[in-house]
Image (cartoon, coloured by chain):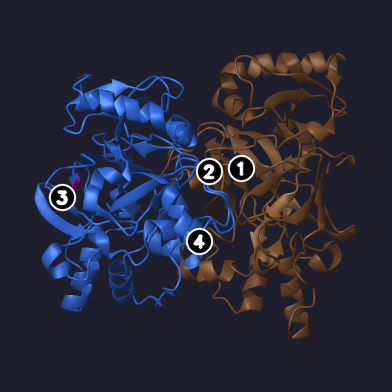
Chain colours: A brown, B blue
Amino acid sequence: MIFATLKADGPDGQLIAVSKDHKRCLKIEDPVSNLLGAAENWDRIAEQLLAISDQLANGDGSSLDMSKLASPMPRSWQWLDGSAFSTHGDLMQIAFGLDPIDSDRPLMYQGVSDKFFGPTEDVTLPSTEHGIDFEGEFGVIVDHVPMGTSAEDAMAHIKLIVQINDWSLRAIAPIEMKTGFGWVQAKPACSMAPFAVTPDELGEGWKDGRVCLDLDIDWNGNKFGSANGAAMDFGFHELVAHAALTRDLVAGTIIGSGTVSNPNYAEVGSSCISEVRAIEMIRDKGAPTTPFMAFGDRIRMEGRGLDGSSPFGVIYQKVVRASL
Amino acid sequence: MIFATLKADGPDGQLIAVSKDHKRCLKIEDPVSNLLGAAENWDRIAEQLLAISDQLANGDGSSLDMSKLASPMPRSWQWLDGSAFSTHGDLMQIAFGLDPIDSDRPLMYQGVSDKFFGPTEDVTLPSTEHGIDFEGEFGVIVDHVPMGTSAEDAMAHIKLIVQINDWSLRAIAPIEMKTGFGWVQAKPACSMAPFAVTPDELGEGWKDGRVCLDLDIDWNGNKFGSANGAAMDFGFHELVAHAALTRDLVAGTIIGSGTVSNPNYAEVGSSCISEVRAIEMIRDKGAPTTPFMAFGDRIRMEGRGLDGSSPFGVIYQKVVRASL
């Protein structure tokens, strides 16, 4: 099943189910009308959602206007972002002379969840002096996960898969990191690609709790990276279990993979500027040459299905100066 | 004005306004029926709230049953906790041999906001091996704060003041802190005292964006601490501005002071076990003697008004093993 959200009066938008070719849609209005509500009632409404999906498969539905789409989940009670690609972590540590982080346990922080930018919305930030960077990621959305759920049991709680741009401010990040308290200022609101899909939509692209697809990234029209999501050190089910050790995860919790990053970065590129700068620092034994983003810059991100399809649709956004 | 929340069917409970003697209450049902809704519509409904407050002052209202109270805000989109008492930070750093943290900027992390335990609710945690600890704090609730709001302007966005127990798991905390990503497992859901009050309710107890009141803490019936909230290095308005540098703060955002801690801790005691253990380690040049909490332990926290009153009411809770 494929879901998206039309911009609407309320902050949660209007949930729609979308046909496999992304051309048609049907509104979902009762008993829930947004994706957060769907996550809260997943098992209870699963049959109904399947019936709507069947209607779409039979050719029903109205034409989908991509320009009307918000983030599939415009807000949630909880956003927990992992950092599950060790290549990314290793490069950053070498470049910045950080102590190696114990890698026996997943890395994770809690970020802004009250707002996820839609796929084509301008992203407003206050200053380029903060070192504006993108981070291409995959993510999952769970229903209610009881405290203490095992990784094995967590798999069944993963109801939807999404694609995320975790906006990051690199001039602030190391200052906050040094405190041990994690990021607040360095991690403003994220963006989400238009479609949230059930795992079965990815076919063999969903394996061992990993999104085994390339994430194509273009920055101002120039190819930047196509790293693959299979290289996660921990699967999403393990990230879910990690998060749920001492808390119930509220339905609709979004859990991110962290920047998609591969050991063969020389061939496939990267999913954030900071990693490229780290590679430059290591390679050239000096200062990095790639700058961070400027206002007016555009970023495009698109996960590639194994059949060349675009299961999550495209994030295509411009960074603009916030009017403060 | 004094607000509380009755347990009700929905997750946000039923908002009530409470008389100054905490004996009577009036339901608030239209146009909002919970405190999150009130924060979202504060300016629009301020007159109406004042009218209800006047009704209470005139003797209206039904009898308040304290046993029916949930957290005044049972959930919110965002919980950002500061650590604004440098005595606490200094003690922890010395005891654990941590590098001093740059204190020019407020410390802050984002924690679970989808659940705040009510004032007398049992607190369920999975294991005493995690080092269960309380943290007595004050906090504020803001309406919508635009990105880039100054500390000066932030003051007017502080609509309510609350008292919080920030549950902490000390065996996990340093492991997560070392990663720089902040706490996820080490910070389960917090608890909130029954009453959320407008700043004017504290009289001279609200000054320079600080709650200048003693926070009385008893652990299993033994006096543990009475530190005063005036000693914050940064006022709440400064914490709000810090949080809003790169994000809009969604209405209903709760911002915490961090563990209330005073330089004269030898006289006034502490607001968390971990600080007492740090003091023991420094004093005795050895292992701490005070253990963390056991299942069945009870914690009581009560902020003291300047007139001896109890503006936030009492947190009185038992820690119990979660049934996993």
Secondary structure, mark 4, is loop
Neighbor class of circle 1 (other Cα within 10 Å; few <14, some 14-19, many 20+) is many
Q: Is residue B303 magenta?
A: yes
- Label 1: chain letter: A
Gap between marks 2 and 1, in whole Å?
Answer: 9 Å
Q: Is residue A47 above or below residue B75?
A: above
The residue pinned by badge 2 equals B250
Q: CA distance from mark 1 to mark 4?
A: 19 Å
Ranked by sequence position, the earlier of labels 3 and 2 is 3
Q: Which residue is mark 3?
A: B219
Instruction: Compare residues B249 and A219 and report the one nearer the observer.
Output: B249
**Few, some or many residues within 10 Å of mark 3 (<14, 14–19, 20+):** some
Q: What amino acid type is highlighted by mark number 4?
A: Gly
Tell me the magenta residue range. B301-305
> Which tag, 1 or 4, sits closer to the chain's start?
1
What element does badge 2 sit on? loop
Question: In the visual, does A117 lie left or right of A244?
Answer: right
Q: Which residue is mark 4?
A: A182
Instruction: Indicate the amino acid at tag 3.
Output: Trp
Q: Quadrant of the C terminus of chain A?
A: bottom right
Determine whether label 2 and label 1 are within 8 Å by CB.
Answer: yes
Residue type pointed to by label 2: Val
Kindly state the secondary structure of the residue where label 1 is placed: loop
Name the residue beneath numbered marker 1.
A115
Q: Is residue A322 above or below residue A280?
A: above
Dot 4 crowding, Cα within 10 Å, few <14, some 14–19, many 20+: many
Could you tell me how far apart the alpha carbons at marks 3 and 1 are, in whole angstroms? 39 Å
